[in-house]
Image (cartoon, rainbow, N blue to C red):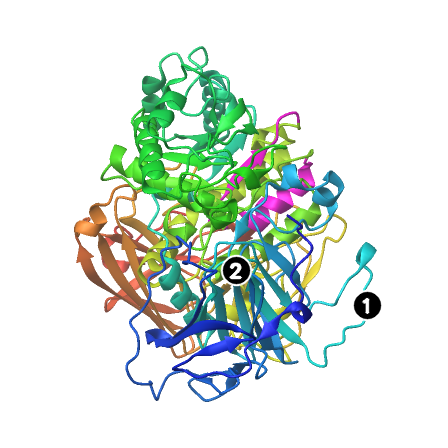
Amino acid sequence: MYFRKSPHIANFDFLKRYSPKGPNRIEREQFLFDVSARRDDIFRIRVKHPQWKKNYSQAGLSLPPKMRTPDSDGAALHVDSGFGITVKGPDQTVLLSSPPRMTFGVSGTQSMFVFRQRPDQQFYGMGEKMRGLELTGVRTKFWNTDIFGDFHWQEIEHDRPDPMYVSIPYLIIKRENQYVGLLLDNPYATFMSISAPPEIAGGQMIKSNMAEQYVTIGAEHGMPDLYIIVGPTLAELTRKLQTLVGRTPLPPVWALGYHQCRWGYKSESCLKGLDKNFRKHGIPCDGLWLDIDYMDAFKVFTFNKDHFPNLKKFVKDMDRRGRKIVPIIDPGVKRESGYPVYESGKRADAYCRNPQNKEYIGLVWPGETVFPDFSIPAGRAWWAKKVRDFARKGIDGAWLDMNDPSTGNVRCLDMRFNKGKDSHYTYHNQYALGMAQASRDGFAAAHPNKRPFLLSRSGFTGISKYAALWTGDNMSNYHYLRNSIAVSLNLALSGVPFNGPDIGGFAGDTHPQLIRDWMKACFLFPFCRNHAMISTRDQEPWAFDDDTRDILKHYIQLRYKLRPYLYNLFVRQESDGEAILRPMFYDFADSDEKPLGRIDDQFMVGPSVMQAPLLSGDRRHRAVLLPGDRPWYSTLHGGWIDAASEPVPVEPDERQTALFVRDASILPMTPGALPTDNKWDGRRVEFHLFLRPGSDATSMYEYVCDDGETLDYQKGKRSSVIVTAATEGDDALVIETQRDLTGYGRIQPQFVVYGDFRTVTINGKPAHLTPSPQEFAGTRVIPFSVSHRDNGGRGYATPGT
């Protein structure tokens, strides 16, 4: 597999004449074109030919119904007689077009769609790519790799290895402030080029013969099946994509906590030591993760009995102490006669085969290994039973690794699927998807009413239905820190909202300033885990100097303070497909004065919180562009700042980070001081009201809570309250609450305001304001706690912190 070589447009023959009723020929070959309009402004172009027997994709897309008649108020797709495609938004703006007689082409088994690139377009998405946020000029292939096994160390450490672990051939095209998405549902090796310049040996650029600039998207094999999705806004586009590929099921609340991991944790004593130190230093932590060393000789579904003499009791005791034990699970099964797991899979005929129709053998940690065939129901069912039995030991979550699939120095192309009938290309990119699906089935069988948490290294379109992603093995340097933001943002826009990097970096020795900066940048990412490689320096918060430990502690605690806000973002992801981590142009319009589409070092967490971290070891100041036209509350300044057209210079000290809250925002938080443990009771909530006095602002927020662990919320055991806040005149604030659902019990709200209001009323009753100093993102700020005058501060009182 050549990672840097892709099919070239000059080697393709294209459809010249098109008739909706057919027949349609490219040279002498006849093709069947199926062009359909679906609800929600989704269009599908599928091309059939005998060489593409079927679409091997197992993404499990949820297709909206076909449109019988065109929607006059919606987007439109027009196909002319030369198969030229024009896509218009609801306002008739042309968002996408293709060159007539050069829109769809073939070259043997390869296929390609071609679209014009306009000078005013920008490009995003592509799943997991370390190529920056905006992707003009990128040429890339989609083929899941094991980066540390497939690339040279020099390229890994300081360059941008491509392709990475995840293949999601999805492209977002932005024109002005309207958006269209292209999703190619093809599991084979796929490719894209955004007018990438031609290259020859040594990466030297040469002049192109093309008169126009083109966007190409295609595959080396497999049925062409392209979805065109019109937003027209980025938020609408993302919700439509998420609904198509599958929204993320509401995770357990512990999955949104802080997680500690290291390659080398291997025993009860290791994990007890971690628990002791987290308690000693008052640092909340939900997950303690086990890498491969916990196993017996690296054999999957085993624990080393010397290290875990009473596993069930230990896991249960740690659970009582608020720690979830999350072990790694690799797909490779040691090929060893008498090993029960291997023998069981052999009896079930659950393994992939080689070209000789025997078990395919690769190399992973235990040595020679066989691999479950997740492409077939029998393979997934066998794996699900093994995961079920494993989870019944008390395990509530798992870490799915090496599922690219990683086969050492053995050629992965010799691994065949469907009992040897299908080539490796049909399922390589989907291997992790099938593993995640089967693993989730196993956890559901073990704990029918519990929400599992699965984390996967690799993935394909639709992975978010089953597992979160971390962005794979990274390096402890500022290059990876800076790029982690764009990688996670584009993943989020590509249908994987639950993701995040290894904080501090996995390989190499981190250092105090780097891990401080990494934690300050990523403490509100959907997934928050500190992970380090064996033989590197210790990376736990207390492994550094006291100041660094305290800074890391502060941002971990701040994550737990804001966990109700994060949890409610996931509630909205499950119900609507709303993004969690977002680029600024998701919520705000791009303009010449504020070119948000080019800014890759600021980002939004939900609709209300913006971060602008320091991402350089030697540049300790920066400029921050405040989007929109309303003021922002700056935790760095401890006050309100107007959203001017010029960037705001900031120079945080080592404890601070630049964090801003949007005007008219209501943030639900954990009540009281910064948490020192991970306890959860969503019924007790503190609403922080960010409304600037005199701003003529009104805000409404629906807060939802449940037990954070079970599926009972699907049966009505959920509570919610709607909070409305409005400024009146220059110095008055009116707060109203309305209870909506009470299935989980009565919500007990408290309020904190960030403005010097003279009068505040709650549900028509006068309230009293008390200064409530607290440290927020490293800065001491002084908001006001709100309490009813007639109850002596009880009921709505917020303790000072």
Q: Residues within 10 Å of mark 2 (few under 14, many from 20)?
A: many
| Quarter-of-image position of residue 102 | bottom right
- Horizontal placement of 779 versus 652: left or right? left
- Horizontal placement of 595 versus 321: left or right? right
| Quarter-of-image position of residue 702 | bottom left
Residue 699 vertical position relative to residue 522 in the rendered view, above or below: below
| Tag shown at residue 276 | none
| Quarter-of-image position of residue 627 | bottom right
Residue 528: in magenta span: yes
Residue in front for this viewpoint, 170 or 343 = 343
Q: Which residue is mark 2?
A: 169
Residue 141: in magenta span: no
Report x, y in % for residue 434: 40, 44
Report x, y in % for residue 441: 30, 40
Amino acid, disc 1: Ile
Q: Is residue 284 visible?
A: no
Q: Residue at x 17, y 50 (%)?
A: 715
- Horizontal placement of 211 versus 363: left or right? right
Chain-order first, disc 2 or disc 1: 2
* Alpha carbon separation for disc pair 2 and 1: 27 Å
